[in-house]
Image (spheres, rainbow, N blue to C red):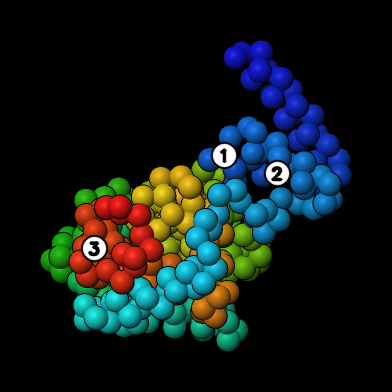
Amino acid sequence: MNELNNVINDELIDLLIKYRNITGYLFPIGKVKSINNEELIKRIKICISEKKRYDLKLFKLNNIQIMTDDVFEKIIPLIKQNMEEVNYDYINKSKEIINIINLRKCGKKFSFSEHLSALIFTLLNNNRWGDTNIKENKSKIYSIFHDFDKNYLKLVDPNELINELKKLHCSNPAIKKQLYALSYNINILEKIEEEHNSLDEFILKNDPNDIAICFSEGKYKLKQVGKAITFDYLKMVGIDCCKYSIQIGRLFGKNRLAIVSNEIATFEQILSIIKKLSKINKISEIEIELILQQFCLSKSANICGEFPQCEKCRLKSICNYNK
């Protein structure tokens, strides 16, 4: 077994060198941490043969879409119909994000304070899907944070902010760590501004997955900000992107809709499937993700969550659960 691993590692090293020589770039190892060496080698070889930098669009992932096209095309329409039948207003719940995405598409540029407010609201909302308390107190939160003035927030005692948020019931278990890291994070965001003309320009010219890696473990690492939070923050400044979700991964897996042959779809599989659903239904990827999330989450429509409500579900005829 060790000999086999050594052979694979030697081959991998040779391919990485060849990739660098042909494309002029280092291979982005951080993007492919979840896949095995065999799949990685195959992808590098494709990049080399195509003489192109690594991009998910180059690959048709294995085991995607076992179901037929005509069934695949029914998924989103059936889910929409299903949520209407249980009187769940998925459109209203998605409206804020969709409006922000559309503003970006219409040419809006986001200021530093808008980026900062997006990041802070994302942190406050972490693990609170379906909770409307922060949304209902948005104007008061703007007041607490002095309209997200970076100079004020670098100097204010974090405890003052925490106490005010607690009065509104808008805190969370990680609030102390989040706000004690605020001054440090603002300094990092200012550094990005200095090195890339503006924070907005940096966000626009980089792939969302690269930014998520950069903020969670890379050059501009932010405290209390992981990949999932980065993706949610990017949506709040108009970037059309998706993140990994255990709920969606389970929905696509072999024990539910069986769009993939594994039990829970990987991040790359989810991205590939959402892209296809977006194209078929002629709506943005983020709208597809929001519809799927709300279909699954217990604080939303709660139809296909951890304990599915199959008696209410329009997809049960094409689903493997309980079969």
Residue 263 x, y percent position in the rendering: 41, 45
Question: Residue 156, located in which quarter of the rendered image?
Answer: bottom left
Q: Are marks 1 and 2 in contact (CB under 8 Å)?
A: yes
Number of numbered tags placed on the structure image = 3
In the figure, residue 276 lies in which quadrant?
A: bottom right
Residue labelled with disc 1? 35
Q: Residues within 10 Å of mark 2 (few under 14, many from 20)?
A: some
Where is residue 35? Give x, y as percent.
57, 39
Seen from the viewer's position, the closer of residues 98 and 76 is 76
Secondary structure, mark 3, is: helix
Q: Residue at x 51, y 78 (%)?
A: 281
Callout 3–callout 2 Cβ contact below 8 Å:
no
Is 95 positioned to the left or the right of 104 in the image?
Answer: left
- Label 1: element kind: loop
Disc 3: which residue: 310
The amino acid at mark 3 is: Cys
x 34%, y 65%: residue: 317
Mark before the other along the chain sequence, 3 or 2: 2
For the residues labelled 1 and 3, the Cα–Cα distance comes to 33 Å
Name the disc covering residue 43, or none: 2
